[in-house]
Image (spheres, rainbow, N blue to C red):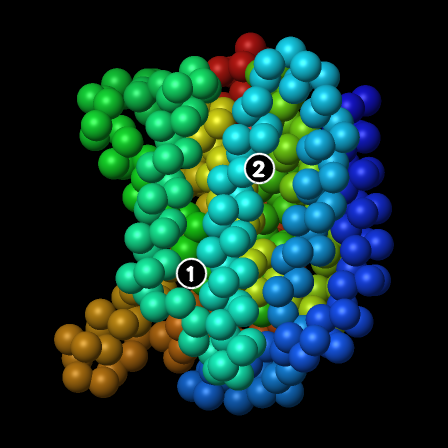
Amino acid sequence: MRYLQAFLISLVVTVLAGRVCIPLLRRLKAGQSIKRDGPVWHMSKEGTPTMGGIIFIAGILCAVLVTGVRDFREGNWSAPAMLAISLIYGAIGFIDDYMKVKRRHNEGLKGRQKFLLQLAAAVAFILLLRYMGFLSPNLYVPFLGVTLPLPEPVYVVFAAFVMVGTVNSVNLTDGVDGLVSGVSLPVAACLCALAAAWGRDAQGLFAAALAAGLLGFLVFNFHPAKVFMGDTGSLFLGGAICALAFGLDIPLILVPLGVVYICEALSDIIQVLYFKLSHGKRIFKMAPIHHHFEKCGWSEVKIFAVFSGVTLSLALLTFFCVRSRYGL
């Protein structure tokens, strides 16, 4: 019942927040600046309100605070810890978005600044989870059902770079109307189901609220988008997904669940490296890979449907392949 409560509160608050925030963002002239080297047809999106991540963040925040009262009274602070790291990443994204809006340019924080801030947040969160007893320095390998023990310092370094890599991969996926929301929805649903199966209700409530927030945001972000989540939303989202995976002590589950995120990041890395090594040649028509498919003639709706469908299939497969860990 609490899962349903969290879902409904997050969904309703997100939709209501969208009705209020989108006109406000327009009045504040918080419009998106489109990259000049991006797809030409995206120029029509210039000026669409950004920083819309605050819409679903509001829904998730309300849902976690209202439904988590029982856990707080029992001394279980895992949900606030996950919410806190997500908000920290969201704050980094908000600073980046604010600088872009203020400068009327598609460049905010420098890459090194973002990386160091994200890395510091990741290390702090991993150490906090270890202190709270929710995380072990042992890697559970999905599908194989084995656990690999690691030395603590090695695990912390590994975990921090996984978090930073995942957060930025999620950020790269946010390039087509509704795409990162549609891809992340089944990821959140799968993590919610695993949390419920394991009896980790605090994490499950957070995941349910996350899924509902994304669903509510799609009301405004599906093509043609009335608002973009911006780095405020995409970094918060990446942080939330990492927080859940590590909070459930199954970080490697991000590999099968995050295949789309990984493909987006790899396509960008491969394109840049090949461009430099070949002195100007390209493998993809444009990177990240969703832009490649756009240039191949795919509509934004088709990209949304295919990428989200692939993630949904992998989420179902992942759940059934790791459910034995939870006695199902």
Q: Are marks 1 and 2 in contact (CB under 8 Å)?
A: no
Position above or below: 300 against 154: below
Task: Depth check: give the residue in front, 278 or 235.
Answer: 235
Q: In which quarter of the image is residue 312?
A: top right
- Rendered location of residue 59, percent (x, y): 73, 45
The reply, left or right, for residue 137 in relation to residue 253 is left
SS for dot 1: helix
Residue drawn at the location 31% of the way across and 21% of the way down: 137
Is residue 295 visible to the viewer in this orientation of the structure? Answer: no
The reply, left or right, for residue 276 in relation to residue 148 is left
- Rendered location of residue 26, percent (x, y): 73, 76
Counting residues from the start of the chain, the first of labels 1 and 2 encountered is: 2
Q: Residues within 10 Å of mark 2 (few under 14, many from 20)?
A: many
Is residue 227 visible to the viewer in this orientation of the structure? Answer: yes
Whole-angstrom CA distance, mark 1 to mark 2, is: 25 Å
User: Residue 264's mark?
Assistant: 1
Q: Quadrant of residue 124?
A: top left
State how many labels appear. 2
Q: Quadrant of residue 51?
A: bottom right
Q: Nearer the viewer, mark 1 or mark 2?
A: 2
Q: In which quarter of the image is the N terminus?
A: top right
- Rendered location of residue 261, percent (x, y): 45, 53
Residue drawn at the location 43% of the way across and 76% of the way down: 107
Q: Which residue is labeled 2 in the image?
A: 83
Disc 2 marks which amino acid? Leu
Disc 1 marks which amino acid? Glu
Residue drawn at the location 49% of the way across and 81% of the way down: 103
Q: How crowded is mark 1: few (under 14 residues within 10 Å), some or many (20 or more)?
A: many
Position above or below: 183 against 254: below
- Rendered location of residue 323, percent (x, y): 54, 20
